[in-house]
Amino acid sequence: MMVTPAPIFVSTACLPHTEPLLARVVAYHNCGLMFVELGARVELDFAEPLCSILPVGSYLIHNYFPPPAIPFVLNLASADTTVYQHSLELVEQALELTAQLGAPFYSVHAGFITDPTAFGTTSFVFPPPQNPEDTAAALQRFISAMHRLADTAQRRGVYLLIENNICSHELVGKLLLQNADEFLQFFQALPHPNLGILLDTGHLNVSAHTLGFDRLAFIEQVAPYIKAFHIHDNDRQADLHQPIQPDSWILEVLKRPEFVALPIVVEATFAHVTALRDHVAWLRGELGRD
């Protein structure tokens, strides 16, 4: 049976500067990029409902979007009750917006064991857990949050996807869901039909190097749960958000028959929108997603 390839989306974070949301979306549309993931590096400078002013197109919602008036760090495993509640409320609103836009899923980062204290070069800075029980407690808070939110997603008729966290050397033991065993334990504890994985190839590349596991073995283990991809590459040391190249291991993963029908979101960084457009055109040709 022929499988229809899914479209290639582009993240609002693909350009290095921040600008108003509508300006970013219009710039993408003017280059023929009609499939857009709404996430980072945009500002909402209007009060009207988002659905009423977005140009016609196809959209996904990712993580900290729409950004709240009072900023905070989204963490669905936080021990801080205020952060935890604000995180739940933001995701509830994002799931509602996802349904209003007719998008198939909303994606969110897996939880952090501790809340960040600053932002470093490529990621937040986290204090280490004070004791081993902190990790188990954070996981239980995350499972509880995801159970509630997956039920909300089910009522809205959408999926809730969890993005694998990155694990550079300075992040070891500070974040949840960085390896396959952790994901399998999570889904065993919460086998919800509306939950899945947004596999971030850049995060996986760094985590596999840091923790010493095989990135393709990771994919084999969690493949039944993968529902979409964030694609970008790096040097295996840091989350550099580089465009994938013709010899990248990522291309072979995306060509696998079981992944052909899954949406892809480009999350690499480009100097100009025309470079992003050209990259997407190349990807479409490579993957047969014209």
Image (cartoon, rainbow, N blue to C red):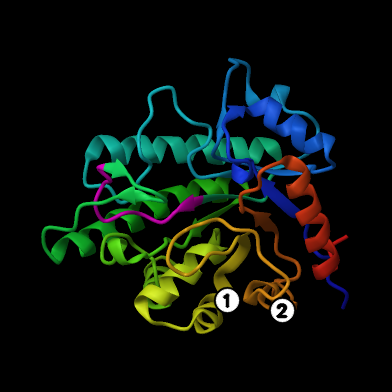
Q: Residue at x 44, y 36 (%)?
A: 90
Determine whether 24 is above or below 162 in the image: above
Region of the chain picked out in magenta, as a range: 108-117
Question: Dot 1: few (<14), some (14–19), or many (≥20) neighbours within 10 Å?
Answer: some
Q: Main secondary structure of the magenta part?
A: loop
Asked if the stretch drawn in magenta spans residue 28, the answer is: no
**Residue sitting nearer the eye, 192 or 6:** 6
Q: Amino acid at mark 1?
A: Ala
**Quarter residue 72 falls in:** top left
Tell me where residue 273 appears, x and y as whole percent: 73, 41
Magenta includes 114?
yes
| Badge 1 element | helix
Q: Where 13 falls versus 54 (above or below)?
A: below
Residue 126 rendering spot, x and y as whole percentages: 26, 51
> What residue sits 71% from the left and 41% below the top?
272
Residue 223 - label: 1
Outermost residue toward the top in this view: 47
Residue at the location (29% across, 62% down)? 170
What numbered label is drawn on residue 104?
A: none
Q: Secondary structure at mark 2?
A: loop
Q: Is residue 59 left or right of residue 137?
A: right
Residue identified by numbered label 2:
256
Q: CA distance from mark 2 to mark 1?
A: 11 Å
In front here: 247 or 88?
A: 247
